[in-house]
Amino acid sequence: PGVVAYVDDNGNWKSLKLGEATYPENVYPLLATTANGTIVNHNDPEGNIYEVGDTGRFPIAAAEKLDTGSVVIVSGASPYGDYMPFIATEYHGVALDGPRFVENVLTWSLVEVEVLNVIITAEDEMGDEFYQYPTNEVFVDGVFDLTSFAVFNDETNYIFKIGVRELGDNPWSGPNGFSLQYFTIYINTESGGNTSGVPGSHINISDDLAWEYAITITPGWESYIENPDSKNGPTALWLADGTTKTDVVQVSASDLSDTVLVIVPKSELGDLTYAKFIVTLGGHDGFGVYGYRPVSTEAEEWKFGGANADWVIKEIAPYVVDVIPGGKDTLTPSEDKMPVLSEGVGKAPSQPTTGGGLSPALIATSIIVVIIVAGIGVYMATRKE
């Protein structure tokens, strides 16, 4: 692999070594070596800035945002070595998520913005103790614990950022970067709307928070919307009348930051400045009903446990296991009915909109790809920069 440097306005070569160099405006590292990266040799001719024996975190790929709005991505030869491309899935027996890397880079370039407005941020108060986890080893501690939610917008998109305590390492290679979770964002923008939860969720919404839009975020396999024989839940935008759009929701995820990013065009949602939001989390199950993992009185290999027996018999036990906002009582059924979610988060009309900085998708996906090499521990040699 090769490393990346740059030439300033005076024609001088400059280092882009992470932690040491000052990056020019609108230039960002995408992929780097570990802190022990070493320049071991040069191809002819000799290097212009890095010397044999130099050590540090060398950029293997970098990007520059041009004044025209275009993004140029530069890589020194093959990032992994042996002429393996970015999209490679394996390097000398070490698994690489090359396709996800390429998708993250494309997502990065698509959503980088100069000013990003923060609509709302919220943290979880409930924890993940409402139900017992299924007993299979893939359900590690924290995968069903929401931690945070934020909504941002740029000129053309809304960006929703959902945090969990542990994303779970995508054990079944879900195309969207995770395998175990089923997220839903309910959006209330005006009076009226839908008070039912999405199919399979076993929850309802209070009248004053009835939703005009719901966004379901699942691992990304073909769902029952595309194929009636499938039981996978959909990644889709739902309208209050029950119609769905599966081609307007873009999803990416990071196991490094345990976050899921969801991008939806503004044209699909209208003005959300003073909207109210509810975020729910359930288990995704490709063999479940509408993609939700079922619950029972006792935890089983593939079922949540801890539900009241009456709830199970009456089919009112929620298949949602965590929610923002709300506490444990939020999901408790009452009067023989499914639980009704009656709290939302949003910005009051008197609150100012906060701006500035870079898109969270830019930040998150930059971190993802910069650390990929460190994560797999590949020793990075170099050619001429």
Image: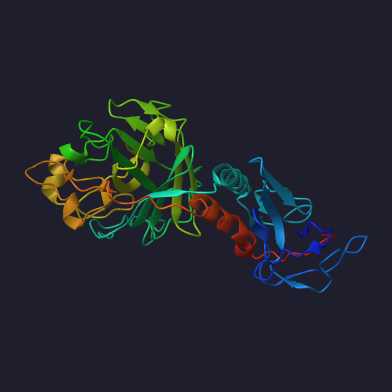
Q: Most extreme residue toward the right, as rendered?
A: 45
Q: How many circles with numbers are drawn on the protein?
A: 0
* Image x and y of residue 153, in percent: 44, 44
Q: Residue at x 29, y 53 (%)?
A: 300
Left-right relation of 182 to 203: right
Q: Quadrant of the C terminus?
A: bottom right
Left-right relation of 196 to 163: left
Q: Nearer the viewer, residue 111 or 371?
A: 111
Task: State whether residue 91 is above or below residue 37.
Answer: above
Q: Nearer the viewer, residue 144 or 125?
A: 125
Q: Nearer the viewer, residue 277 or 12?
A: 12
* Image x and y of residue 165, in percent: 38, 60
Task: State whether residue 27 is above or below residue 21.
Answer: above
Q: Nearer the viewer, residue 16 or 52?
A: 16
* Image x and y of residue 24, in percent: 68, 59
Q: Quadrant of the N terminus?
A: bottom right
* Image x and y of residue 173, in percent: 51, 47
**Is residue 187 something one can see in this rendering?**
yes
Q: Residue at x 55, y 51 (%)?
A: 362
**Is residue 180 something one can see in this rendering?**
no
The part of the image, by quadrant, that contains residue 198 is top left
How are the residues colored?
A: rainbow
Q: Residue at x 43, y 55 (%)?
A: 167
Q: Residue at x 24, y 37 (%)?
A: 197
